[in-house]
Amino acid sequence: MIQKKDNKIPIGIYLHFPYCKNICSYCDFVVDKNLDQIERYLNALLIEIEETSNKYYDSTKYYINTLYIGGGTPSLLSPSQMSLIINKLNNHLDLSNAIEISMESNPASLDLQKMKEYKSIGINRISIGVQSFIKKELGILKRNHSPNSAIKSIYEAKEVGFNSVNFDLIYSIPNQINKDWISNLEKALELEPDHLSCYNLTYEVGTPLYTKLKSGLITKNNEELDANIFLQTSELLEKNAYKHYEVSNYSKVNHECLHNLEIWRNGEYLGFGVGAHWYINGIRYENSKSINDYLTKIEKGIEISRNVKTLNENDKFEEYIILGLRAEGINLNTLKEKYKINHNILDSYIVKKMIAENYIKINKLNIKLTKIGYLLADSITYEFIKLLIVQK
Ligand code: SF4
């Protein structure tokens, strides 16, 4: 757990940059390929940073610990545009204690010089969207880069000397057989990233991939194959000194993504940009997902539309279980002290059964999912919430 400084609470910042040169077939993020709007978006973002910080950030209570610039493709921003954002954040929120400043990127918009400049303005962690080292698979995903350009970006990111280099891979791409995935993983290991995210491909409603699936042009891999791939991945990466610290995330020692870790620990964070989610003072916010609405409101000096939800004690408790089980587990002391669960849940039939079936393990008062448990994370989480709500 990250410690308080001068009694202030560490929080993160998430900043969303929605533009991409090309929209991938599986993508359901808030994205747009109208690159002509980048300058306009940047101006709006700078205004939003100033106004939201003034209104929602209390520097006597909080300090900024991490910054995560996600997208979209933030590497479409030139280093000088990126530095405008970082300077603005620094002026209004003070980044001097931020230990991790992370940005997402796409190999098609990265080069050595650009990465050197990103580093010189304070970016110390880079995440590269690789997804696959197999050309045919990149084609199915409609990625706009080749395996070789991704490999080049990884070598260059290492040469630049970021504190951490991550890349993302996707498994269960249509027609992928086990051997293809293992060759992707072996290539990844050869490149020695500090951190690796391995996501199971999902077919989100409204995406071109979903439409193809529904019209029978592609078929989904079966669940048994997915489960095998997940278990094999975890085993192979752990054998190579990567810690499996969240369902889809692996890191070398001290290279966990601190920003995400704090979110999974139910930590607070501010959010800027279209569609950004954030959580502060017990309230969850979701910025408008419409780029047009976001831009026009800011330009007219109107506060942007947001969904706002004030969490009650039960909501906070449920989030603790949902987020905790995804990553570091749920702690029996926390359940007792913070959530007033005095009953020893280890005595319950359902928990004993989960332990016997190797879905969960207990370590120093911490309940954590096993690898097999990760495969059933949703239903185990549901069982825990049901069980614990009754005890409250
Ligand atoms: S690069 Fe990432 S954010 Fe952009 S369209 Fe592809 S998946 Fe979506």
Image: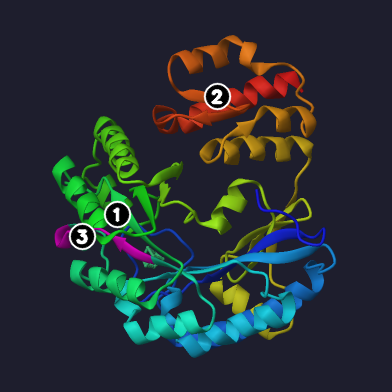
Quadrant hosting ligand 1: bottom left
- Total count of labels: 3
Q: Residue at x 80, y 60 (%)?
A: 8
Residue 184 rendering spot, x and y as whole percentages: 21, 53
Q: Position of residue 327 (x, y in %)?
A: 53, 41
Reply above or below: 20 against 271: below
Specify which label sits upstream in the sequence, 3 or 1.
3
Q: Residue at x 72, y 74 (%)?
A: 93
Q: Is residue 30 above or below residue 364?
A: below
Q: What is the span of residues highlighted in magenta in the rendered image? A: 128-136
Q: Nearer the viewer, mark 3 or mark 1?
A: 3
> Distance of mark 2 from mark 3, alpha carbons?
37 Å
Label 2 vs label 3, nearer the camera: 2
Pointer 1: what residue?
209
Residue 353 as seen in the image, left or right of residue 13: left
Verify whether residue 130 appears in magenta: yes
Residue occupying image coordinates x 75% and y 45%: 311
Identify the residue under disc 2.
362
First in residue order: circle 2 vs circle 3:
3
Residue 25 appears anywhere in the view:
yes
Q: Residues within 10 Å of mark 3 (few under 14, many from 20)?
A: many
Give the residue number, with chain letter if any, for mark 3: 133
Judging depth in this view, the residue of 188 and 26 nearest the camera is 188
> What x and y, as percent, mark residue 238?
34, 41
What's the CA distance linking mark 2 and mark 1? 40 Å
Marks 2/3 in contact by CB < 8 Å: the verdict is no
Crowd tier of the residue under label 1, counting other residues whose Cα lies within 10 Å: few below 14, some 14–19, many 20 or above: many
